[in-house]
Amino acid sequence: MDIPALLTSAGMNIGISVGMFSLYSILRKQPLNVKVYFGQRIAQGRTRNENLCFERFVPSASWILKAWEATEEDIFACGGIDAVVFLRIIVFSIRIFAIATIVCTSFVLPLNYFGEGMEGVEDSTAMDLLTIGNVREGSRWLWAHCLSLYVVSASACTLLYYEYENIAGMRMEQVQRFPTKPSHFTVVVRGVPWSSVESYSESVGKFFSNYYASSYLSHQIVYRFGAVQQIMEDAEKMYKVMTTVPVMAAAPVDQCCDTSVDHRCGLCGTGSNSVKMIGAGSELARRNVDDELREKECEAALVFFRSRFDALLVSQTIQSADPMLWVTELAPEPLDVFWQNLCVPYNLLWIRKISVFIASVVFSVLFLLPTTFVQGLTKIQYLQNAFPILRRVSDRSYINLITGYLPSLVLTVFLTIVPPLMMLFSTLEGRVSRSTRKRSACVKVLIFMFWNVYFSNILSGSWIERMGKLTVTSPKDLATLLAELIPRQASFFMTYVMTSGWSGLSFELLQPVPLLGNWLFKCVLMREDDFIRPVTFAFHTEVTRVLLFGLLGFTFCILAPLILPFLLIYFCFAFLVYRNQIMNVYFVKYQTDGSYWTLAHNATIFSLILTQVVAGILFGMKKSSSASTATIPLIVCTALFNVFCKNRFLPLFRNRAAQDAIDMDRHDERLGKLQEIVENLPKAYNQFELCGDEMQVTTKQEEDAHSDKPKKSTSSESLEDLEIVNPENLITGDLPSPSASSSQLEHEDKIVSIN
Amino acid sequence: MDIPALLTSAGMNIGISVGMFSLYSILRKQPLNVKVYFGQRIAQGRTRNENLCFERFVPSASWILKAWEATEEDIFACGGIDAVVFLRIIVFSIRIFAIATIVCTSFVLPLNYFGEGMEGVEDSTAMDLLTIGNVREGSRWLWAHCLSLYVVSASACTLLYYEYENIAGMRMEQVQRFPTKPSHFTVVVRGVPWSSVESYSESVGKFFSNYYASSYLSHQIVYRFGAVQQIMEDAEKMYKVMTTVPVMAAAPVDQCCDTSVDHRCGLCGTGSNSVKMIGAGSELARRNVDDELREKECEAALVFFRSRFDALLVSQTIQSADPMLWVTELAPEPLDVFWQNLCVPYNLLWIRKISVFIASVVFSVLFLLPTTFVQGLTKIQYLQNAFPILRRVSDRSYINLITGYLPSLVLTVFLTIVPPLMMLFSTLEGRVSRSTRKRSACVKVLIFMFWNVYFSNILSGSWIERMGKLTVTSPKDLATLLAELIPRQASFFMTYVMTSGWSGLSFELLQPVPLLGNWLFKCVLMREDDFIRPVTFAFHTEVTRVLLFGLLGFTFCILAPLILPFLLIYFCFAFLVYRNQIMNVYFVKYQTDGSYWTLAHNATIFSLILTQVVAGILFGMKKSSSASTATIPLIVCTALFNVFCKNRFLPLFRNRAAQDAIDMDRHDERLGKLQEIVENLPKAYNQFELCGDEMQVTTKQEEDAHSDKPKKSTSSESLEDLEIVNPENLITGDLPSPSASSSQLEHEDKIVSIN
């Protein structure tokens, strides 16, 4: 690819972006689209005044101003800690690439251009002249490259350290900030041993009241996902039985099981005792229901403790001599629980994990096909020899379009299937919370992107260029191959930054699929109900994209610095666009408490070390052994820095500190709040309410599917992510509001606020 | 190397072994050598009747009979669980290689010999005809090789599973068997934060009595290693002050600090309150001593809890928000504590670990020199072209000696420096217990041996054979190189088995260095004191050796099966010799509770997978693609089996189960024993007694060093391992007997039994 092709691509992408940005600024002012562009605001109850005036049809930059002016506190209030961390990743990228752009375009780029290393080479394009490939062998200017590498690495490590410290602090504050989270008091137990004598629920009750008598409060067995609907129907039947039989005057056997919560029996409180309050007359019916319930139990339970410290201790201890039994971990937040996977038997988990691993590897290998095809488009002039039919495409502008814009577009389209697939893999892996599932998907997508977008593009591109002439003649060649190939792919990745980055941002902003779906629903089909439901932010796609661009930036910064301005523009716009989207569109259902940062840290360290290794080899190839040797201490220092950060900060992202838990317990006890929190625990984790909501949504989704409407493009969000929840509760970490079925008066005001 | 050279080596080694075995059977009957050969029995108080009769000078096999007849219980009583596990590793090796010998010598060996693949090759020796190299390309007999590989792999996995299960059970029993171990109640705290206001001891006391008020009993600060002697002298001064000042009638402030234990003040009980019982008159002296003590404190402490469960919970919890502060782990047994390393600041540990890692890598690389030299000896005929001086060595018998016996002897000699060095590395790493230090050294030695003995011998051997002609022409070649080279090195490794294995065993049996040292001491220098002190078993050397031979056995079993009978003989003798040595020579000071098995398991899985990969590549090279493909499911299954075992058993080797701890606590409480155990805790971990003993031994060692006596060859045992302890207490897990300084009457009988 040469300069005109790059310009074609830049022109097209700038055009698309500017057009879409303007379109967005008009569309967002239309009342019809409020639900598309302000899903979160509506969920939070904030409305806008809508006057039909001329301003509504004029493009404006007001949204950019609003996004820019928002403080970190605003972001935190709207998007929670994960959104803040995501924006901090972008800010980190802006900072480091601003430094890199200044250093590399002012020192490295001119040296490359006047390097005269490619004077004799025939097929060199103008783009190649700007890469390190144009520096002569043995040139003493390579020292400037080496120095730039030092500056970039040192700045990156310094910035990483402060960000890590900052985010670790934020994560610690998070616990203090939302002291009433029910997850602090709750432990998930899996691998409850099967017993022919007693039900799972009885086993759990017996085990914990035996070993943790002083701290154990109650538990709640998990029911099979499909079975929940069934049980609710049964409970209704049961209710009828109860209303026909006179209720005994005797007090409820179990205090925790509130008699007023009539059709929730068996699900809160100490489980198995649930239906005991029913009169003796209905003994037979009770037994039937009991047996039915028992059959639907999974070997997993949520166990509630009297204090945070007790729950923490139990979650970190191995309970049984058989490590596959009584496996404990801290529970996710109620809305974060992924009930389906809680039912997966614990001893099958490792098989699932291995299967998913194998499937991911196979998928990565198969994905080499589209990558090679994409690279074939870029290097179309090389393919003309092999496929004479391509020679007919002689028109210069067509060639520019094909080599400049099409390849990265095709790659972007192919890549849209990756996040949903990885999300599916993470679901199959058996994660018990939505947040860890999304984070695990993020890791998978990240590895996939680094391998399939970065390395395989570089390798397959070179394979096509040489068309079989690619022979590695010694193992040393294998190492130098990468160093030789990376600079040659710079132009492709520049177009990729524009297509996937710039245009991707404008698509993100415009949300075309919900927009069109909404119009169809409202204007064509004239339906009353909404096409759009608020969705959670797709961290696994967006974090990955930002980190991939980070990898591109680092590895190309001294090899082909022309990519840096393009990246910097991307990051700046990303900062504004994502701020706008987080504040207006997405709602928060669950949080990972900032654990995406560890991913970003690892990816950045990997990018840095790869850059340094590649640079070291390249310096060696250019016969500058002193510059090559000088990179070795840099690599060692970066690795040491990583180990230091791992020791210093990583444990904070893995565990909670006992000290904090005890201090919080004491504080709450002093204020007399502990008892209240603890009493509300079983209600918080009511599988029937939580799953009931999901099932209603699922049923609705099925209806939608039958009506052949287009769905939201972010299909990676599985169906149960689409339900409507009051986001305020989520951010503030309060107990989720009980559904209308709860008859308790103290919650009625909240219920009103929802309905 | 050809058959005569192999026979020379076999003859020499058999001669040496038989001679030494006979010599041993005579020497062990001499009263002079009792301390050399029956160190453990003497320590246990079991004596032998010694009559001067003719029998004493006749070689006999009675020791073999005794070793054979000993039950597992006997071994357990003498050597503890680690010895039992070590012998089970040998039994596993005997079983699997008996199967492999039967299968491979009856099917694979004849097929190799009649394979006719080397008919045209000039420089093939008779040995090469017995390897897979002699099978023709495309031969359908390769299916027999593949089938043998399946049989061996399946048997190995089955045996591994049952052994793992068995040993995991043994480890569980171990906890039940010795319920009074003080380590169950004790937690090591490191990284106590520095405070200008209070001493470390006060900080620890305040922290734990604040957060663990109900379970915290007392603590004991760790003093700097060199400072302990100093403090003891100070304490004596203090004692004098005390005796001159009238002691106040007031009761001791802290009950735990027993007034009768006068010169231990400040070291048991709640530390900082230690000297408070001294009258007001000595206030000034008290302050001075207090200040001095404070200066000598480390940022580490042993904290005692009221029950096993409490200690377990604390050890598994992260205490503070800063992960480098208040780091807790379960304490090692009193005699297992490595006091020196407890004083290493916790936040320096990661730097030490990295430095040790780098040092190990550098050492491994440097060790390529002796390996290449050794391989040069084996392939002396190839070197004659490069170094004409070698041509003078034309005598056939010399050549046989040089190529057959010398190389493995030289390698064995070079390798003797590896275990002590790795032990030093593990010490520098900062392990806080002797047992984990030894296990960590074992891992290092194992990796070193696998890399430096196995791979580098194979690679350097081939490099010499080709003398620069070794050029890898494609990356595929790199993979196939190993497969091609391994069979060619079979003959060298056969001689290695004989030299390092057979002769090594007879040296182990004869213990030449202590034997000669003892003679010099007793007969030449006429000294009264003993040259020998009982030593602990060098697991890090011996486990590694057995596993290395396992690696050789697996990788050569279908490539060059002639090695198998040699190995089988080694394992059978090893079984007898080690049983004898464990029962008679070595004593037990600390145990890892069988955690060497996890190492053996991993090494065996590694060996199996390497074997399968190499075989798969070799089948491919021999143009038998179906046999080559058939190895792929085998590799996958072995890997899956490993993951399964990791999930099923490994957690048992990492943590203790809460259930067991609670059950034991309750049992002891019911019997009223808990209080008694708990009261003795601070006495058990008395740094002054434990270190005092060490220092006495050290002083004595220094005296020995001045008298220029030869030291024990197992120099890997650092000095403090050589002290005399009553092993019975160790095996039974009782509290260690207090030294004579303790004035408590109930222990006096024990003291008598030592002195």
Image (cartoon, coloured by chain):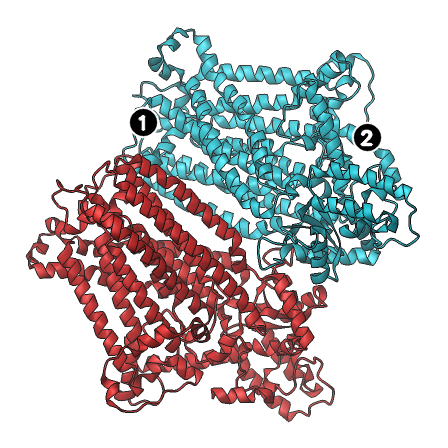
Chain colours: A cyan, B red
Foreground residue, B202 or A627?
B202
C-alpha separation, residue under disc 1 versus residue under disc 2: 62 Å
Three-letter amino acid code of the residue under disc 2: Gly
Residue position for label 2: A45
Instruction: Indicate left or right for B386 with B172 as reference.
Output: left
Residue A628: where, in percent of width, then height? 36, 40
Dividing the picture into quadrants, the one containing residue B122 is top left
Count the numbered circles shown: 2
Q: Is residue A568 visible?
A: yes
Residue A470 — which label?
A: 1
Would you identify the image quadrant in which residue A35 lies? top right
Q: Nearer the viewer, residue B221 or B735?
A: B735
Q: Classify A182 as above or below A340.
A: below
**What's the mark number on residue B345?**
none
Is there a contact, CB below 8 Å, between mark 1 and mark 2?
no
**Residue B272: image x %, image y %?**
65, 75
In this view, the residue in front, A579 or B634, is B634
Q: Amino acid at mark 1?
A: Leu
Give x and y (percent) for residue A448: 50, 33
Q: Residue at x 69, y 49 (%)?
A: A301
- Compared to B441, does A711 lie above or below? above
Q: Is residue A719 left or right of residue B724?
A: right
Pick the quarter of the image with the N terminus of chain B. bottom left
Chain containing mark 1: A
Q: Earlier along the polypeptide chain: callout 1 or callout 2?
A: 2
